[in-house]
Amino acid sequence: MSSAFPEIYLVRHGETEWSASGRHTGRTDIPLTAKGEEAARGVADRLKGVTFQAVWSSPSQRAFDTCRLAGFGANAVKKADLQEWDYGAYEGVATKEILAVRPGWQLFRDGCPNGETAADVGARADAIIGELRPVAGNVLIFSSSHFLRVLAARWIGLPPQGAEHFVLDTASLSILGYEHDLTEPVIRRWNQR
């Protein structure tokens, strides 16, 4: 899974009660389920033998607990910009419920009332990318689905709305990197479980 160039390993947090039921979980700090904790421990085996120059985590309980259970908590730095999308009025609400009152709604196009737009999340992703580019080594990041999708889109030069074409399962592993040189960012692996 390695490359001659630095790689950015992305881990989506393990399952929570809300992720299992499809409810938008932005800033609500809920714990992992037992299944989520078990999957988080399994991340450690998938990362054996990989050396990281830095380990970053969203400050959310679900992301940091995934980081900790995977064995990386002692070296992790929490970064506010890695937080999940702020869903505002749609926090804790499932997409099908939103569509019942707002037909045609799409998160990446329409954003959330009293919450963030795709451009807002894209600006945070760009800030993280600005911190990643100078790191001379692999970086491991623990965060949430919609943020990591936007981060990947921005990494390869897509607008934040391009993230609608990516999907991430809980406790999945994805890798961002480069192809021929550091001017060619690519997605090397996506949504591996």
Image (spheres, helix red, strand yellow):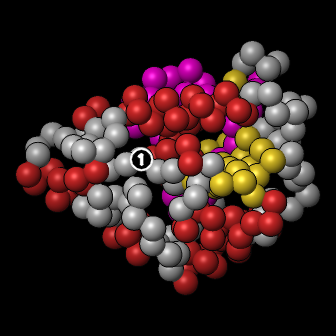
Q: Position of residue 109 (x, y in %)?
A: 29, 32
- Note whether 22 is above or below 33 in the view shown: above
| Left-right relation of 116 to 50 | left
Q: Position of residue 169 (x, y in %)?
A: 51, 58
In the rendered image, residue 161 lying in the magenta stretch gets the answer yes
Q: Position of residue 128 (x, y in %)?
A: 63, 35
| Left-right relation of 110 to 58 | left
Looking at the rendered structure, the secondary structure element under dot 1 is: loop
Q: Position of residue 87 (x, y in %)?
A: 32, 50
Q: Which residues are magenta?
A: 154-179
Q: In this orientation, does residue 167 appear?
A: no
Amino acid identity at mark 1: Trp
Q: Residue at x 38, y 69 (%)?
A: 18
In the rendered image, residue 112 lying in the magenta stretch gets the answer no
Residue annotated with mark 1: 85
- Note whether 56 is above or below 129 in the view shown: below
In-front residue for pair 90/10: 90
- Note whether 153 is above or below 15 in the view shown: above
